[in-house]
Image (cartoon, rainbow, N blue to C red):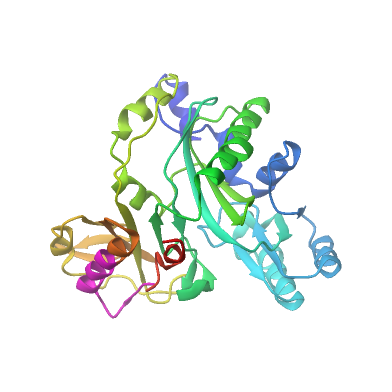
Amino acid sequence: GIVDRFQEEGLNIFGPNQAAAEIESSKAYSKNLMKKYDIPTAFFSTFVDYDEAVNWVKEVKPPLVIKADGLAAGKGVIICHTEEEALNILDDIMNSKIFGDSGNCVVIEEFLEGEEVSFIDFTDGENVIPLESSQDHKALLDGDEGPNTGGMGAYSPAPVLTPELHDIIMNKVMIPTVKAMKEEGREYKGILYAGLMIKESDIKVLEFNCRFGDPEAQPLLMRMRSDIVPLMKTISSGGVAEGEIQWYDEASVCVVMASKGYPGDYKKGFPIHRIDEVNSMDGVFVFHSGTARDDGNIVANGGRVLGVTALGNTIPDAMNAAYKAVGHIDNELLYYRTDIGKKALKYI
């Protein structure tokens, strides 16, 4: 609603208004929009009644994905491989309210296999300008094991996304979604992010976000040659988004360093050293996520603490640079995946 508030005062602001932002804030709204406008997504159903949700799970059978309808800090999506697991999760979300009011409604959908890719674009409500491809790593542990998180690392470009698939995504997902929002009276302006599942030439939308992805934004912005500000100013002032964004040829890898215990309970307040030294490394930048200052020291103050991001001529080069930097910061109270970017290697 901050966009609505700015607009009431005649102030420019970059981003979607509250009605358009429901494409992220309500998974049920997003899924029903895709169903109405034939935008490819997983088979699903939505529920506000716990007993009806239980009966649907028993009828359809896992594996299934259960999603809290509202925002849940990146933790509201749970993959359930067994019926028992699915029923326990439904009880947690709908009865125990582990996500609060965000779980008053749930979306239950088929489990999709393939590779997850992030596709982000700028839009003025009609025209769509895509960013380069990137791939997030949602799971906590190496090999995509463990619980979902807000993202443990990302890289760009994502070679799984070929030029042919890029065109399919633009023509079947991004452009139709922007048109659909306008048709619904919710003209969408700003950044539109689609989380996609790709299996060979089959593409389905997992979710939409109305913002840059974290940690995808870190490697993307490291690679961006164009100045991002003029485009944001043009869209925020009601102008037409046009032209193409220019990119550096290098690859980029971001490794998230998280407090041990995340996404569960974790410690705060412990010091983190040598960040300035890492920032002085060629082609490396440390993005702060969950940090604070305490008596002149940088200390951990959140679950995901740092996004250590590096450029390289190739993805392996960027991986090596990022992990060299991570090793320099290494702290026994921080955890990080050791395989960020590894998915890309089979395409190289």
Q: Residue at x 69, y 55 (%)?
A: 104
Would you identify the image quadrant in which residue 198 lies?
bottom right
The range drawn in magenta is 320-337
Q: Position of residue 236 (x, y in %)?
A: 41, 25
Tell me if residue 14 can be seen. yes
125 horizontally vs 246: left or right: right
Q: Position of residue 55 (x, y in %)?
A: 85, 66
**Which residue occupies the extreme bottom position in the image?**
332
55 horizontally vs 316: left or right: right
Vertical placement of residue 11 versus 253, above or below: above
Q: Is residue 330 magenta?
A: yes
Vertical placement of residue 67 versus 339, above or below: above
Closer to us: 145 or 270? 145
282 horizontally vs 332: left or right: left
Q: Position of residue 292 (x, y in %)?
A: 26, 60
Q: Is residue 202 magenta?
A: no
Tell me if residue 302 can be seen. no
The quadrant in which the C terminus is found is bottom left
Closer to us: 271 or 125? 125
Closer to us: 167 or 308? 167
Q: Residue at x 50, y 57 (%)?
A: 73
Total tally of numbered discs in the picture: 0
Q: Position of residue 302 (x, y in %)?
A: 36, 64
Q: Residue at x 42, y 65 (%)?
A: 345
Would you identify the image quadrant in which residue 18 lies?
top right
**Which residue occupies the extreme front position in the image?**
348
